[in-house]
Image: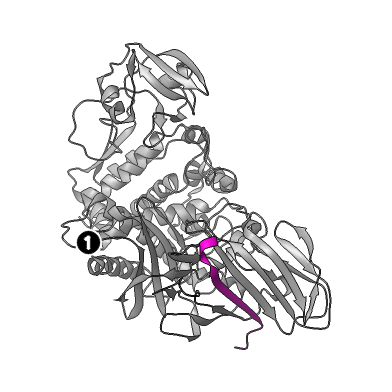
Amino acid sequence: MTAALHYTVSPDEPARHRFLVSLDWPLAPESDLVLQMPVWVRGSYLVRDLARGVQDLRAWRGDAQVAIERLDKASFRVPAGGAGLRIEYRVFAFDASVRRAFLDTRRGFFNGSSLFYVPQQARGLPVTLQVLRPQPPAGQGWQAVSAMTPLEIDADGFGRYRAADFEELIDHPFELGVVERVPFDVQGQAHELVLSGRYVADPARITADLARICAVEHALFGGQPHLDRYLFLTHVVGAGYGGLEHRNSTALICSRADLPRPDAVGISRDYRGFLGLCSHEYFHLWNVKRITAQRFAESDLSREAYSRDLWHYEGVTSYYDDLFLLRAGLIDAPTYLDILAEHATRLQRSPARKRHTLADASFETWIKFYQPDADTPNASTNYYVKGALAALCLDLRLRRDSPITLDDCMRALWRRHGATGVPVPEGGLEHLATELSGLDLRRFFDRLLRSTEELPLVELLADFGVHADPRACTSAIDDGGRTHARGALPWLGLRLKPGEVQIAHVLDDSPAQAAGLSAGDTLVAIDGLRLVFAQWNRQVEAMKPGEPLTLHFFRGDELLETTLVPQKPPLDTWAYTLAEATGQAAERRRSWLGT
């Protein structure tokens, strides 16, 4: 492959959080050229205006500097000339998420979407990337780690890489810094856990567990595709959680408490959450990165790409992520049912389920999901949570009424789309499930996706020997599932910001809303007693439904007073438990849960 575009990235100003980036196109055409930076990152559906970090943008044709004509926030034009093109600029990189770029004296990270302009005429041309080592004293002990194909690199990973085109270039994030690299094997395919940050953990145990998860995911698709390597790029922080999928890697953020210590026994809730995150992002290797929505595949990342199918790409993935923990033998069936009950509880506690459909939530992700506000619980359905439960309903319906399962649908999507590179048209999973099952599923999908009816979870689970029991919340940390607590927590219908007595959300038709409380109000006292966050749960537990309380609070700089009347708690908390099952119900449950 002869590269046409040559990019260079230099972390030369870590204390100022700036990368120096250049693009060379020696054989650039003599016509005017329009260069563009993406405005959103694949896998994260929000216009993020990635070019806002660009500084000191300059261009040359040969040895002559040329004027740049700005066309919009993300693109510019370079005039025609008789020589090759060179672009140079700096990028301010101080976003510690998995979505953009970060650089300081301890660490660097970047997604190419946040750093690279591309000439519109050259999106399909081969690319090389040179990643330079920071100048001393910065960068001591640093490595450069990426799944991008190396051309000529040193022992620490700095040097030249290649990509088939711009899309491949921006689909390989880079981790720069002091890292721990722990290789492991999955069916003869090289995988690696790459840890950065400060932590005390047991990497050998983590990779052993990851290997089991990855193996059952590959088994679903018959061992395909074969990977040269796959990286779990994991940055460990004090408190954080998130992931972004890529074609041969994933970028992750986790909390120190999420990782098992060398002396840990069993799987803690935090570690289970980390494994679920890894399982989720790894499943995107198929469901998103290769089984790709046509609406997203057609996008050049210059504007929103609307689809009503995010429930398929994120919701189905969210259904499978914890199911793979069960299939890998890392959790048992009762624990898995607790996880499903937590999802159902989260949905039940969201008033938005009564007004915002799953299809609309998918379509409106560009203005809702990634930009939550005070009214989000009342107005916006989470397509990860409800999508996972819709996928559960679909799987159970197929298992009960047809000879196929959701597994069969995913394998068919792989054969028809993932393995062939043909994107999935809108509504693809819905049409495929109907075709393969032989069932008339129009009304079923209307209920799941295009209505605000409650999902048919109770009746479907019953046909698999699982009892669904709605109950009242028993404590501030009761997220659903089995509980040994006694009593019920009085219902206020407000949620506080973490660690504060300031209101984050007020739920529709709640006692807090009836009392005139709003997001942003800072609670001061109840019945003349000062409120502090550490005592909040205890004070709520002492309240009695129907007994009025005098509440003082600040709204802005005004001290106000209202009467708050706690109510009897709603049955908004689910517990899913294994019931006595015989005959078909027992057989179905064994096929689904392995019990």
Q: Nearer the viewer, residue 563 or 60?
A: 60
Q: Nearer the viewer, residue 505 or 593?
A: 505
Corner quadrant of residue 284 = bottom left
Q: Which residue is mark 1?
A: 329
Residue 574 percent coordinates (x, y): 30, 36
Residue 468 picture quarter = top left
Q: Over which residues does the magenta segment extend?
A: 1-16
What percent of the width, then of the height, locates residue 189? 35, 79
**Quadrant the N terminus occupies:** bottom right
Q: Is residue 70 left or right of residue 103?
A: right
Classify residue 6 as left or right of residue 589: right
* Residue at the spot 70% in from the left edge and 59% down from the top edge: 74
Query: Label 1 amino acid?
Result: Gly
Judge left or right: residue 279 versus residue 438: left
Is residue 405 visible to us here?
A: no
Instruction: Check the image and report above or below for 104 versus 570.
Output: below
10 Å crowding of disc 1: few (<14), some (14-19), many (20+): some
Location of residue 386 in the rendering, given as x and y in whole percent from the top left corner: 43, 44
Say how the picture is coloured.
one colour
Q: Residue furthest front?
A: 137
Q: Does the magenta portion include 3?
A: yes
The x and y percentages for residue 452 are 49, 36
Residue 375 seen in the figure = yes
Residue 582, relative to residue 491: is it above or below? below
Residue in view at x 65 percent, y 61 percent = 54
245 falls in the magenta region: no
Quarter holding the C terminus is bottom left
